[in-house]
Image (cartoon, grey):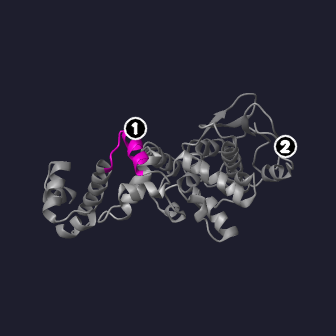
Amino acid sequence: MRHIAHEVSRQHGDATALCRGLGFSPADLERVDFRVSYAQTGRVIVRAQQLLGDPHLGLRLGTSFSFVSWGLCLVGMMASATAREALDFALDFLPSTERFLRLQRDDGEGQLAAIAEPMHDDDAEVSRFLVEHAFAALTRACRFVVAPWYGPKRVEFSADAPADPRGHEEAFGCPVLFGCRADRLLFEPIDQPVATADALVARLCRHQLEQRAGAGAPSELEAVIVRALRADLRSPPTMAAIAASINVSERTLRRRLVDADLSYAGLLDQERMRRALGLLGASDAPMARVAAEAGFSDARSLRRAIKRWTGQTPSALRRHGD
């Protein structure tokens, strides 16, 4: 998503139109704790392809992504012992596919295949973007980690052939087939050593990424409301303001909350708890300041809330933190 926004900004000077009515702005994509839903991602992908007039934007972005944006996934690949292990690591933790595209490995027929299965197959345009982006990025990362000559021997796409397939052939450097039964990236099953291998670092990266994957993600509705609340807990936005930011009525937003077994008050209390306990654990700030930052009228109200949340007093929490 961030890469898409950067590309639209580069060509048009502003990526605001990508996010209009989705409850977030391009600036939110730069936040460490920001997450997007599949629905939000799909709308941005379609809008970007229309704005840029590029039906194969996923392929182009996949061949030009910044390696450092893969973070621990790239480090884990570089720390893997062989090309096989590096590919396995990428299939497990490829950043751009999280929750949107399932990547699996198949060792049959004397070849090593990466098979892509969209987790939402109701939009062919979005699925094509995700598959092309994942395959192009995976090919580029494997060549960077293993060797420039290392790459797929054949690529198979379930989508129909484009008018000009030369861009795909240049991206993968091998035969590319279309209209196939599945989306597959096929490699020679060789145990090429990775020059930067470090078994301990590989295990550490895997451990960290598995913990992160297990954390789960909020629903799109919850994420929109939480994001709005975090912006200003001292003066949180009204339900009407939040509804307007995502182009629905307040009544519709309230109904969706009920359907999702959520409540505005509950989410606000959750965010005030997160902010207050975070400040108490990370600083010696006076209670009055913590109360103000978390949106409470005074320190006394905050103390009562902390007792309700934890069963302890603020001073006891700080002692335990020490």
Q: Considering the numbered disc 2 on the image, is that residue within a helix, a strand or a loop?
A: loop
Q: Which residue is mark 2?
A: 175
Magenta segment, prevailing SS (helix, strand or loop): helix
Judge left or right: residue 289 versus residue 24. Answer: left
- Check residue 6 for magenta coloring: no
State whether residue 41 is above or below residue 233.
above
Q: Judge by depth and name the residue closer to the eye, 88 or 274.
A: 274
**Rendered residue at 40%/47% (across/down):** 251
Q: At label 2, which amino acid type do we have?
A: Pro
Q: Nearer the viewer, residue 107 or 127?
A: 127
Residue 174 visible: yes
Circle 1 residue: 259
Res 313 quadrant in image = bottom left
Q: Position of residue 174 (x, y in %)?
A: 83, 46
Q: Is the C terminus in the top left, top right, bottom left or bottom right quadrant?
A: bottom left
Q: Dot 2, crowdedness within 10 Å: few (<14), some or many (≥20)?
A: few
Element type at marker 1?
helix
Q: Where does residue 160 sit, x and y in percent of width and height?
A: 80, 39
Residue 262 falls inside the magenta stretch? yes
Counting from the top left corner in percent of width and height, residue 234 is at 29, 65
**What residue appears at the point 14 percent right and 58 percent down from the top-left corner?**
303
Region of the chain picked out in magenta, as a range: 250-264
Query: Residue 2 vs residue 205: left or right?
Result: right
